[in-house]
Image: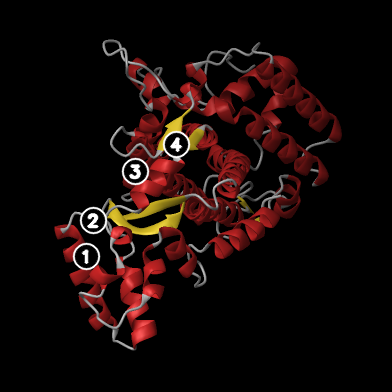
Amino acid sequence: MRNKNKTVWETRFKSPVSKIFEKIGASIDVDKRLFEEDIFGSIVHTQMLVKQKIIDKAKGKKIINGLKKINNEIKKNRFLFSKKYEDIHLNIEKRLFAIIGNDAGYLHIARSRNDQVITDFKLWIKKSSKEIIINLNSLIKTFLHKSENNVDTIMPGFTHLKNAQPISFAHYLLAYVEMFKRDKKRFFNNINYIDECPLGVCALAGTSYNIDRNFTSKKLGFKKPTRNSIDTVSDRDFALDFLSAASICAVHISRLAEELVIWNSDIFNLIKFDDKMLTGSSIMPQKKNPDPAELIRGRAGENFGKLQALLTTMKGLPLSYYKDMQEDKKQVFDSYDVIKESILIANELVKNLKPNKPRMLALANEGYTTATDFADYLVQKKNLSFREGYKISAKLVNYAEKKKKKLNELDLSEIRKVKKDLDKNVMKIFDVKNSVNLKSSYGGTSIKNIKKMISSLKKEFK
């Protein structure tokens, strides 16, 4: 009879494992999250063993029924996980022995924990990537809705955090739509990269049993089996790809959060948040702080750290499996939790922000933001080179600065001081709304362009 107090590999060991190693060697606190994928993989593996007549139907049915019972126990919080049995695989196997007896020992034919865990992990990442894509879709739709309501809202575009040129607020919002579309594509691409089934490669060399890996692959929802058994157990590229996609997405969320914090400041005063997205101070009664935005800005570092941690783990490993790889799941699970929450919070922030339209328009007129339009006007209407037009426009800015006037506050006689042959038609160049509409090149900020962008994107994200 099997000794119920030993793990499956302790048969030839003369003494129990050290307590400190038992503590750090066990991964059950982390990988119990894979229970559904592990049981699903075991059921399909059993079906394949029956199909190939490696085990008989009666044993197969017994094993599958036992696995389904375990799945139900875990979902109802009636399953006792134990560090003694290290990981999700052996915890489930131990319980299966308790339920069906020694027939549980047939489950692990033609399988190793090496290929088993990669199968579980790939299935989990596929599922989780799809969940992130759903959340990104929701975030993009929120941006589109906010854009649609702010096509005519004029604000300053910034370079070096200084006023640069007037833009539509909707144009700014749509920039993040493009970023999050790329994030979505990265997660989609990762699902395609990951779509090869590891199950059946065993420890590293394959197996002598007449297994059908194509059957297993199809049943588990993969396109095909992996080709090289050594590469399969060595591979954690799929985890790195996930961490990379999450990290780049975190960059975009952090940049958004940074701008929202700045724009919500009393100095900029470009946006306001609903109180539900603010917190107070323990000492200053007047304060309303954008803590959610600050937190998702800060938490991006967790995503970057998880990627760096797994890169460092993998960089020195010889081929095949090593215990170091056990650290992969913690990095991915933690990164997933952080990026998912960050996307959800970003969505709430955008939903609950209100642009301060008068302030945006006023600030768009500050900082001589139409100076480039004046230079372009001189090129297009007076046949000057751009550098000549640039110099004349710079002189006008210097004059306005000296007179403490905005460009749209100058009269025609003042403008003629830098170019004598100008007429009243030049005056409209200094209107910020006109400036926005002049930027009609593909991808530019003109109202007409923005409406086309929104219309196209709404069809894409119905």
Residue type at mark 1: give it: Val
Q: Nearer the viewer, mark 1 or mark 2?
A: 2
Disc 1/disc 2 C-alpha distance (Å):
9 Å
Q: Answer yes or no: do the residues labelled 1 and 2 have beta carbons within 8 Å?
A: no
In this view, 341 is above or below 174 = above
Residue type at mark 2: give it: Lys
Dot 2 or dot 4: first in sequence order is 4
Nearer to me, 106 or 199: 199
In this view, 8 is above or below 312 = above
Label 2 belongs to which residue?
Answer: 405
Q: Answer yes or no: do the residues labelled 1 and 4 have beta carbons within 8 Å?
A: no
Label 3 belongs to which residue?
Answer: 313
Query: Visible in this render: residue 336?
Result: no
Relative to 125, is 362 on the left or the right? left
In this view, 262 is above or below 85 = below
Label 1 belongs to which residue?
Answer: 397
Q: Secondary structure at mark 2?
A: loop
Residue type at mark 4: give it: Ser
Disc 3/disc 1 C-alpha distance (Å):
56 Å
Mark 2 packing: few (<14 Cα in 10 Å), some, or many (20+)? some
Nearer to me, 213 or 289: 289
Label 4 belongs to which residue?
Answer: 335
Relative to 259, is 119 on the left or the right? right
Residue at 72% from the left image edge and 16% from the top image edge: 99
Residue type at mark 3: give it: Thr
Query: Visible in this render: residue 178?
Result: yes
Nearer to me, 161 or 149: 149
Mark 3 packing: few (<14 Cα in 10 Å), some, or many (20+)? some
